[in-house]
Image (cartoon, helix red, strand yellow):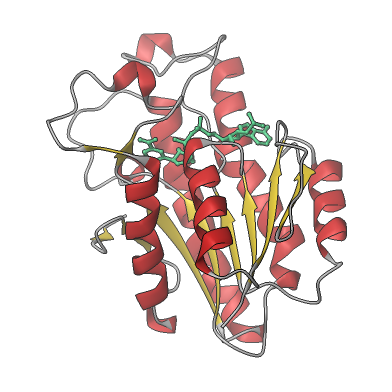
């Protein structure tokens, strides 16, 4: 059966792989792909448009644009930042810096929360629907054995809490919606690029491999699973 799908962050390695997968899965699927640097070329079933998730006006405009459709079956937030020209993950508490931490939280936590605020009303209420957020295993407090990466870890822990609260609230009005975090594994992308040398053989996934695993996880989730975070192999990640 065809579906209507939104990918926020469709220009990233993982987001782009989701867009391509859902486009290929069914020629009648309609895929909306949002990012700051999207390929502007639409085709029959991919609609590209702009979003800056650090700007709520832009998020609201993207949600308004999406109202061309009456509902969506899946919405996946695949945006995120770990490093850029101005910041890199902290090796020690001595590196904590308010500007860098603010930027990481703005993109990894506050942006996804504002996306939820603006896009949850677009979820299908008539049948099972899914709202997923790319989180990360390193956001698990109970799994933290290495320390470091203060801002990124904390931004994903906070995202996990937002996902949990959303799942409780949304269930009251839309019991057909499943809201969950997703850990993609270590995936070859701009985000992971500087940190790939310590990845064990066979553990650096292609975006295509990772998203196919996550698609299978998403398809097998039930309403009881809402509010949790799941890894690429279906393992539930403890908070
Ligand atoms: N790769 C991994 O190993 C790995 C592991 C665990 C979790 N994750 C998570 O998976 C998600 C995707 O990561 P990735 O590896 O695909 O990274 P990526 O290739 O670097 O993609 C990052 C995406 O975030 C978007 N983005 C960043 N800031 C934005 C903003 N202000 N407004 C709109 N879009 C913005 C980028 O879009 P622009 O084109 O606009 O820059 C891009 O689409 C992230 O949440 C990451 O934390 C990744």
**Residue 187: % across, % down:** 34, 37
Residue nearest the viewer, comparing 202 with 164: 202
| Residue for point 60% across, 26% down | 102
| Residue for point 58% across, 60% down | 23
In the rendered image of this protein, does residue 7 appear above or below residue 125? above
Instruction: Give the farthest residue toward the bottom.
Output: 126
Pick the quarter of the image with the N terminus: bottom right
**Residue 9: % across, % down:** 61, 42
**Residue 182: % across, % down:** 40, 55
**Residue 20: % across, % down:** 54, 52
* Residue 170 position by quadrant: bottom right
| Residue for point 39% across, 47% down | 208
* Residue 5 position by quadrant: bottom right
| Residue for point 54% across, 45% down | 15
Instruction: Give the farthest residue toward the left.
Output: 201
Left or right: residue 146 versus residue 5 is left
Pick the quarter of the image with the C terminus: bottom left
Number of numbered discs visible in the structure rendering:
0
Left or right: residue 173 versus residue 193 is right
Residue nearest the viewer, comparing 224 with 234: 234
């Amino acid at each position: 059966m065809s579906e209507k799908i939104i990918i926020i962050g469709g220009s990233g390695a993982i987001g782009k792989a989701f867009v391509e997968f859902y486009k290929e899965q069914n020629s009648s699927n309609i895929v909306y792909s949002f990012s700051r640097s999207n390929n502007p070329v639409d085709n029959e079933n991919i609609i590209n448009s702009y979003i800056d998730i650090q700007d709520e006006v832009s998020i609201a405009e993207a949600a308004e644009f999406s109202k061309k459709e009456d509902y969506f079956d899946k919405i996946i937030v695949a945006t995120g930042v770990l490093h850029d020209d101005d910041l890199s993950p902290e090796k020690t508490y001595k590196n904590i810096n308010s500007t860098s931490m603010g930027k990481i939280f703005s993109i990894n936590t506050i942006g996804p929360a504002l996306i939820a605020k603006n896009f949850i009303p677009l979820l299908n209420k008539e049948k099972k629907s899914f709202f997923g957020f790319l989180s990360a295993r390193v956001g698990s407090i109970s799994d933290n054995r290495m320390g470091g990466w203060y801002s990124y870890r904390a931004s994903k822990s906070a995202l996990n809490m937002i996902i949990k609260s959303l799942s409780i609230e949304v269930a009251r009005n839309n019991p057909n919606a499943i809201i969950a975090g997703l850990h993609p594994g270590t995936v070859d992308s701009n985000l992971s690029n500087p940190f790939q040398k310590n990845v064990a053989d066979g553990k650096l996934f292609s975006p295509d491999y990772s998203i196919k695993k996550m698609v299978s996880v998403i398809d097998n989730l039930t309403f009881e699973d809402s509010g949790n975070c799941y890894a690429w192999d279906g393992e539930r990640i403890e908070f």
